[in-house]
């Protein structure tokens, strides 16, 4: 059966109110408003870790908490559009080599709590790290993690900038930033019996101005990766699984990145399979 779009948010000017919401879910929330800033074309999220700060994982989240939660049996597709990923190393005393802020990530979450970054949540990530961008899916049941989707990691190329026009050595044009689309497909159907939840992550990076040589970067990067996870098993349990999905959202996050990391969210969508109602 086909999937049906049930929730859509355009983040222009920092908006968190859905413009398509036939099932009446609430507006999205930001866990820490101080880390978010309105932009004419989206919502800018940022993280800052200073050399003197704690070493704990950091995240700033934007999420929707469906009233009453969703049945675990739901089949869901989450999609976020974003651009302008950037990272700046932390400042150190003169003579001390700066530590790169990588790795950090833009993340799509399916969570049994309103704390997205929990040990029982499932996340698909677009990870920014040396040597390049990597698509990650949750769990260790798959052994094919680690492939680089786009390299080298060049933050300038992800911003609005001037670039040499095709076929010209001295003519430059203003080009917009690449558009990133990250998807998280989640299947909880019959999970209590199966004991795990399968899913898939997909990433597309579109550079619409790179349509012809001699520009070397690929105009369209596409990657996908399947997963199977037991993360939604409660601690110590072996047969039962969390019975509700209570939050769906997107965040920027880092485990040990040092410095300032940021990205601009453009759109967020949730789709459900009509053969497996979400409530």
Image (tube, grey):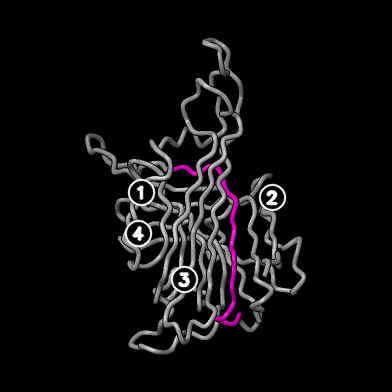
Residue at 51% across / 66% down in the picture? 109
Q: Residues within 10 Å of mark 2 (few under 14, many from 20)?
A: some
Q: Residues within 10 Å of mark 1 (few under 14, many from 20)?
A: few
Residue at the spot of label 4: 255
Residue at 54% across / 38% down in the picture? 220
- Disc nearer the start of the sequence (3/2): 2
- Disc nearer the start of the sequence (4/2): 2
Seen from this angle, which residue lies furthest front?
1
Position of residue 34 measured from the top left corner of the image (x, y, whole percent): 54, 58
Position of residue 75 measured from the top left corner of the image (x, y, whole percent): 59, 73
Residue at 33% across / 87% down in the picture? 236
- Disc nearer the start of the sequence (3/4): 3
Residue at the spot of label 3: 198
Q: Residues within 10 Å of mark 3 (few under 14, many from 20)?
A: some
Marks 1 & 2, CB-CB < 8 Å contact:
no
- Disc nearer the start of the sequence (3/1): 1
Mark 3 to mark 2: distance in Å? 33 Å
Residue at the spot of label 2: 12
- Disc nearer the start of the sequence (4/1): 1
Q: Nearer the viewer, residue 46 or 216?
A: 216
Image: magenta residue range: 70-86
Residue at the spot of label 1: 147
Mark 4 to mark 1: distance in Å? 19 Å
Position of residue 117 measured from the top left corner of the image (x, y, whole percent): 44, 68
Tell us which disc is closer to us: 4 or 1. Answer: 1
Mark 3 to mark 1: distance in Å? 20 Å
Q: Nearer the viewer, residue 238 or 12?
A: 238
Q: Which mark is residue 203?
A: none
SS type, badge 1? loop
């Amino acid at each position: 059966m086909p999937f049906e779009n049930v929730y859509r948010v355009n983040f222009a000017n920092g908006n968190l109110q859905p413009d398509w919401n036939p099932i009446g879910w609430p507006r999205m929330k930001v866990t820490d408003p101080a880390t978010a800033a309105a932009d004419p074309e989206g919502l800018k999220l940022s993280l800052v870790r200073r050399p003197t700060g704690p070493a704990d994982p950091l995240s700033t989240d934007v999420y929707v908490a469906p009233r009453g939660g969703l049945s675990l049996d739901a089949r869901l597709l989450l999609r976020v559009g974003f651009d302008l990923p950037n990272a700046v190393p932390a400042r150190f005393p003169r003579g001390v080599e700066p530590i790169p802020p990588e790795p950090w990530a833009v993340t799509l979450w399916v969570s049994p709590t309103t704390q997205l970054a929990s040990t029982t949540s499932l996340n698909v990530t677009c990870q920014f790290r040396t040597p390049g961008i990597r698509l990650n899916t949750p769990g260790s049941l798959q052994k094919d993690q680690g492939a680089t989707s786009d390299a080298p990691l060049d933050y300038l190329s992800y911003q609005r900038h001037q670039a040499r026009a095709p076929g010209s050595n001295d003519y430059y044009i203003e080009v917009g930033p690449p558009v990133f689309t990250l998807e998280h497909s989640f299947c909880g159907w019959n999970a209590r019996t199966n004991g795990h939840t399968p899913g898939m992550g997909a990433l597309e990076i579109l550079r619409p101005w790179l349509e012809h040589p001699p520009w070397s970067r690929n105009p369209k990067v596409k990657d996908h990766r399947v997963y199977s996870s037991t993360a939604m098993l409660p601690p110590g349990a072996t047969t039962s699984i969390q019975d509700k999905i209570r939050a769906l959202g997107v965040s920027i996050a880092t485990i040990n990145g040092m410095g300032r990391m940021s990205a601009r969210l453009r759109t967020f969508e949730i789709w459900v399979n009509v053969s497996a109602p979400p409530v």
